[in-house]
Image: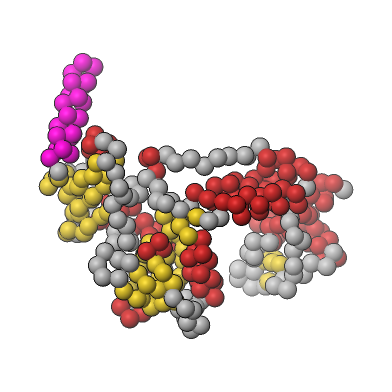
Amino acid sequence: MAATSARTLKLLSIFGIGATLTAEELATRLGTSVRTVRRDIGMLRELGYEIEAVRGAGGGYRLGRATRLPPVVFDEDQAVAAAVALQTVPAVLSGIRENSARALATLQQAMPARSRVHAAAFTVSAARNYWEFPAAPIDAEIVRVIGGAINRQHIVRVDHAGEDEPMTLTLEPHDLVVWAARWYLVAFQPDADRWRAMRVDRLEPRMPTGRTFDRRDVPHGDPVAFVMSTYDRGDTPAEWPCRGSALVALPAPVVARFAPGGSTVEHITDSSCRLTLGAWSWAGVAGLLLTFDADLTSIEPAELRQALRSLHTRVDEGLRRSS
């Protein structure tokens, strides 16, 4: 009976994500048979949960829209995911540390004892690693406003602090993406008829418009892929003791995808771009440039050129001694 109850709770938590899944898919996730899945669905219906059967292509089972889940229905893996997320979120959102700590404490109190013990094993502290080149945590209120507009499909007006003059933009917000510890908004700008990937910390939302829009297909079919391959996404060079640039013989979208956080990519030709980046030493900047395994020209400043010569000498000497 205990195994049946645990399995039924896990089934309920799977339905909680809002997906429509076939009996076969549910059986695979639960590690049981289709017949057992259908019996467990019947049990949930007897308990008052509205489990809908969707017919036709893409059909299966889903939780009815009017159904309310219990306050906390977590399996052990979900408990771990929630605990780790609440402990690490202050690294990317400011003004939320106390609230995340209180949320974690509340969550732990509501968890079954077994899940609580499992989650407690994943007590972590988030620390900065210099190779991650992170940005400062972003204001949680800005994320809330823009995220709410995305959820309601409301057009937003924002003040954008770009490289040139600040301007007010009208946007159709589609997705928020966190990449390299930076928040980006994927939006369509109707008056310019273009898609944009924009740093959220460069945006200041104005009063809500209340105007709705119809969702469009995001370029590349994926907001994450769009952000990673967009070179003019509003990044600015991070403040480092050493900062240099070089002309890289690779297309800008390729370099933009693999450039470290805090760097900028400027389109020059279809097969070349200028990469500007920084590090704590000139050797560090040189090493980052070499990871692209491409021809480098127009290298600036002189200190960076000297660091590349020094690395060349050291590598040659190391190879000579190893042969």
Residue 10 versus residue 133: which sits nearer the camera? Answer: 133
- Tell me if residue 214 is in the magenta stretch: no
- Tell me which corner region of the image, top left, top right, bottom left or bottom right, holds residue 270: bottom left
Q: Residue furthest bottom?
A: 211
Q: Position of residue 282 (x, y in %)?
A: 23, 36
Q: Is residue 310 above or below residue 216?
A: above
Q: Which residues are magenta?
A: 302-322
- Tell me if residue 318 is in the magenta stretch: yes
Q: Is residue 214 left or right of residue 249?
A: right
Q: Main secondary structure of the magenta part?
A: helix
Q: Is residue 311 left or right of residue 218?
A: left
Residue 202 versus residue 65: which sits nearer the camera? Answer: 202
Q: Which residue is at 20% across, 30% downward?
A: 311
Q: Is residue 54 above or below residue 305?
A: below
Q: Which residue is at 12% across, 40% downward?
A: 302
Q: Position of residue 71 (x, y in %)?
A: 75, 60
- The quadrant the C terminus occupies is top left
**Number of residue marks:** 0
Q: Which residue is at 73% across, 44% downward?
A: 115
| Residue 8 visible in the shown view | yes
| Residue 10 visible in the shown view | no
Q: Position of residue 150 (x, y in %)?
A: 50, 71
Q: Is residue 168 left or right of residue 86?
A: left
Q: Is residue 275 left or right of residue 134?
A: left
Rendered image coloring scheme: secondary structure
Q: Position of residue 249 (x, y in %)?
A: 18, 49
Q: Which residue is at 17% across, 59% downward?
A: 269
